[in-house]
Image: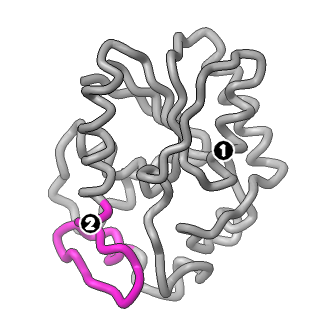
Amino acid sequence: MEILLVRHGQTEWNLLKKVQGKADIELNEKGIKQAEETRDYLKNEQIDLILCSPLKRAMQTAEIINQERNIKMIIDERISERDFGEFEGMPNTDFDFNAFWSYKRNLKYDRAENIKDFFRRVYVFLDSIKNEYEGKRILIVAHGGISIPIKCYFEGIPDMETLLPLCLENCEVAKYSY
Protein backbone atom coordinates (compact mmCIF):
# COMPACT_ATOMS: atom_id res chain seq x y z
CA MET A 1 0.00 0.00 0.00
CA GLU A 2 1.14 3.52 -0.79
CA ILE A 3 0.04 6.66 1.01
CA LEU A 4 0.07 10.20 -0.31
CA LEU A 5 -0.36 12.62 2.59
CA VAL A 6 -1.45 16.21 2.02
CA ARG A 7 -1.78 18.89 4.66
CA HIS A 8 -4.73 21.24 4.11
CA GLY A 9 -4.28 24.63 2.46
CA GLN A 10 -3.69 27.83 4.37
CA THR A 11 -6.30 29.34 6.69
CA GLU A 12 -6.42 32.80 8.26
CA TRP A 13 -5.36 31.23 11.56
CA ASN A 14 -2.28 29.71 9.88
CA LEU A 15 -1.41 33.19 8.67
CA LEU A 16 -1.87 34.61 12.19
CA LYS A 17 0.12 31.68 13.72
CA LYS A 18 -2.88 30.72 15.87
CA VAL A 19 -3.24 27.07 16.86
CA GLN A 20 -6.43 25.69 15.39
CA GLY A 21 -6.65 22.05 16.47
CA LYS A 22 -10.37 21.25 16.57
CA ALA A 23 -11.47 24.76 15.49
CA ASP A 24 -13.33 24.35 12.21
CA ILE A 25 -11.65 27.07 10.15
CA GLU A 26 -12.11 27.35 6.37
CA LEU A 27 -9.39 27.86 3.79
CA ASN A 28 -8.49 31.42 2.89
CA GLU A 29 -7.93 32.58 -0.70
CA LYS A 30 -4.29 31.49 -0.69
CA GLY A 31 -5.31 28.10 0.77
CA ILE A 32 -7.76 27.55 -2.09
CA LYS A 33 -5.01 28.38 -4.61
CA GLN A 34 -2.63 25.99 -2.84
CA ALA A 35 -5.22 23.20 -3.01
CA GLU A 36 -5.71 23.89 -6.74
CA GLU A 37 -1.94 23.70 -7.29
CA THR A 38 -1.82 20.42 -5.35
CA ARG A 39 -4.69 19.07 -7.46
CA ASP A 40 -2.67 19.88 -10.59
CA TYR A 41 0.47 18.35 -9.07
CA LEU A 42 -1.40 15.10 -8.26
CA LYS A 43 -3.46 14.92 -11.49
CA ASN A 44 -1.43 12.01 -12.93
CA GLU A 45 -1.17 10.09 -9.66
CA GLN A 46 -3.24 6.92 -9.39
CA ILE A 47 -5.42 7.31 -6.28
CA ASP A 48 -7.87 4.59 -5.24
CA LEU A 49 -9.40 6.29 -2.20
CA ILE A 50 -9.29 9.55 -0.25
CA LEU A 51 -9.34 9.45 3.55
CA CYS A 52 -10.04 12.88 5.00
CA SER A 53 -10.28 14.65 8.33
CA PRO A 54 -13.82 15.90 9.11
CA LEU A 55 -12.60 19.47 9.64
CA LYS A 56 -13.60 22.04 6.97
CA ARG A 57 -10.08 23.05 5.98
CA ALA A 58 -9.14 19.45 5.19
CA MET A 59 -12.46 18.65 3.50
CA GLN A 60 -12.25 21.74 1.28
CA THR A 61 -8.70 20.78 0.27
CA ALA A 62 -9.76 17.18 -0.49
CA GLU A 63 -12.78 18.34 -2.52
CA ILE A 64 -10.62 20.66 -4.62
CA ILE A 65 -8.05 17.90 -5.22
CA ASN A 66 -10.87 15.52 -6.14
CA GLN A 67 -12.50 17.87 -8.69
CA GLU A 68 -13.09 16.06 -11.98
CA ARG A 69 -11.78 12.79 -10.52
CA ASN A 70 -14.71 11.53 -8.46
CA ILE A 71 -12.53 9.36 -6.20
CA LYS A 72 -14.41 7.81 -3.28
CA MET A 73 -13.85 9.92 -0.15
CA ILE A 74 -14.23 8.65 3.41
CA ILE A 75 -14.27 11.03 6.37
CA ASP A 76 -12.33 9.64 9.35
CA GLU A 77 -12.41 11.30 12.77
CA ARG A 78 -9.11 9.62 13.74
CA ILE A 79 -7.19 11.98 11.45
CA SER A 80 -8.71 15.19 12.76
CA GLU A 81 -6.10 17.56 14.17
CA ARG A 82 -4.64 17.18 17.65
CA ASP A 83 -6.89 18.70 20.31
CA PHE A 84 -5.14 21.85 21.54
CA GLY A 85 -7.60 22.21 24.44
CA GLU A 86 -6.81 25.27 26.52
CA PHE A 87 -4.39 26.59 23.83
CA GLU A 88 -6.97 26.56 21.02
CA GLY A 89 -7.02 29.87 19.14
CA MET A 90 -3.93 31.24 20.90
CA PRO A 91 -0.91 32.46 18.95
CA ASN A 92 1.70 29.71 19.12
CA THR A 93 4.06 32.25 20.68
CA ASP A 94 1.83 32.65 23.78
CA PHE A 95 2.80 29.23 25.22
CA ASP A 96 5.69 26.79 24.85
CA PHE A 97 4.70 25.38 21.45
CA ASN A 98 8.01 23.50 21.12
CA ALA A 99 7.41 21.70 24.43
CA PHE A 100 3.85 20.90 23.30
CA TRP A 101 5.43 18.90 20.45
CA SER A 102 8.08 17.20 22.61
CA TYR A 103 7.64 13.43 22.57
CA LYS A 104 10.44 13.09 25.14
CA ARG A 105 8.80 15.44 27.64
CA ASN A 106 5.28 14.04 27.04
CA LEU A 107 3.63 16.90 28.93
CA LYS A 108 0.14 16.53 30.40
CA TYR A 109 -2.42 19.32 30.07
CA ASP A 110 -5.82 20.16 31.52
CA ARG A 111 -7.70 19.71 28.24
CA ALA A 112 -5.19 19.47 25.38
CA GLU A 113 -4.44 16.04 23.92
CA ASN A 114 -1.24 14.55 25.30
CA ILE A 115 1.33 13.86 22.54
CA LYS A 116 1.65 10.12 23.24
CA ASP A 117 -2.15 9.71 23.24
CA PHE A 118 -2.24 11.65 19.98
CA PHE A 119 0.43 9.41 18.41
CA ARG A 120 -1.45 6.30 19.61
CA ARG A 121 -4.64 7.54 17.90
CA VAL A 122 -2.82 8.09 14.58
CA TYR A 123 -0.86 4.80 14.82
CA VAL A 124 -4.10 2.83 15.42
CA PHE A 125 -5.56 4.54 12.32
CA LEU A 126 -2.49 3.62 10.22
CA ASP A 127 -2.48 0.01 11.49
CA SER A 128 -6.14 -0.38 10.58
CA ILE A 129 -5.89 1.03 7.04
CA LYS A 130 -2.80 -1.10 6.34
CA ASN A 131 -4.99 -4.20 6.55
CA GLU A 132 -8.18 -2.72 5.17
CA TYR A 133 -6.70 -1.18 2.01
CA GLU A 134 -3.82 -3.51 1.23
CA GLY A 135 -2.47 -2.97 -2.30
CA LYS A 136 -4.24 0.40 -2.71
CA ARG A 137 -2.96 3.94 -3.21
CA ILE A 138 -4.55 6.14 -0.58
CA LEU A 139 -4.62 9.94 -0.41
CA ILE A 140 -4.87 11.19 3.17
CA VAL A 141 -5.90 14.83 3.52
CA ALA A 142 -5.33 16.03 7.06
CA HIS A 143 -3.35 18.46 9.18
CA GLY A 144 0.14 19.61 10.06
CA GLY A 145 -0.09 17.92 13.44
CA ILE A 146 -1.20 14.65 11.86
CA SER A 147 1.78 14.76 9.49
CA ILE A 148 4.17 14.43 12.46
CA PRO A 149 3.07 11.02 13.84
CA ILE A 150 2.56 9.70 10.29
CA LYS A 151 6.19 10.52 9.44
CA CYS A 152 7.31 8.95 12.73
CA TYR A 153 5.24 5.82 12.07
CA PHE A 154 7.11 5.16 8.83
CA GLU A 155 10.54 6.55 9.70
CA GLY A 156 10.78 6.22 13.50
CA ILE A 157 10.63 8.89 16.19
CA PRO A 158 13.80 10.98 15.91
CA ASP A 159 15.88 11.93 18.93
CA MET A 160 14.82 15.60 18.92
CA GLU A 161 13.63 17.88 21.68
CA THR A 162 10.62 19.01 19.59
CA LEU A 163 9.05 17.26 16.61
CA LEU A 164 7.77 20.50 15.07
CA PRO A 165 10.37 20.48 12.24
CA LEU A 166 8.69 17.29 10.91
CA CYS A 167 5.43 19.14 10.21
CA LEU A 168 4.34 19.49 6.57
CA GLU A 169 3.73 22.95 5.15
CA ASN A 170 0.26 23.88 3.84
CA CYS A 171 -0.60 21.63 0.87
CA GLU A 172 2.80 19.91 0.95
CA VAL A 173 2.68 16.29 -0.24
CA ALA A 174 4.54 13.40 1.43
CA LYS A 175 4.70 9.81 0.15
CA TYR A 176 4.99 6.66 2.24
CA SER A 177 4.64 2.95 1.57
CA TYR A 178 4.14 -0.11 3.74
Bounds of the magenta segment: 98-118
Counting from the top left corner in percent of width and height, residue 177 is at: 30, 23
49 relative to 106, above or below:
above
Specify whether 76 is left or right of 68. left
The reply to whether callout 2 and callout 1 are in contact (CB within 8 Å) is no
Q: Residue at x 46, y 86 (%)?
A: 95
Counting from the top left corner in percent of width and height, residue 141 is at: 54, 39
Q: Quadrant of the C terminus?
A: top left
Of the residues under marks 2 and 1, which one precedes in the sequence?
A: 1
Q: Residues within 10 Å of mark 2 (few under 14, many from 20)?
A: few
72 relative to 5, above or below:
above
Q: Quadrant of the N terminus?
A: top left
Report the colour scheme.
Answer: one colour
Q: Could you tell me how far apart the alpha carbons at marks 2 and 1 are, in whole angstroms?
A: 24 Å
In the image, is residue 99 part of the stretch drawn in magenta?
Answer: yes
Q: Secondary structure at mark 2?
A: helix
Counting from the top left corner in percent of width and height, residue 32 is at: 78, 42
Q: Residue at x 19, y 51 (%)?
A: 157
Q: Quadrant of residue 114?
A: bottom left
100 relative to 111, above or below:
above
Q: Could you tell me the amino acid type at mark 2?
A: Asp
In the image, is residue 84 part of the stretch drawn in magenta?
Answer: no
**Which label is found at residue 19?**
none
**Which label is found at residue 117?**
2
Specify whether 24 is left or right of 142. right
In the foreground, 15 or 82: 82
Q: Secondary structure at mark 1?
A: helix
In the foreground, 21 or 10: 21
Question: Which residue, given by chain and number where applicable, does mark 1 sit on?
Answer: 59
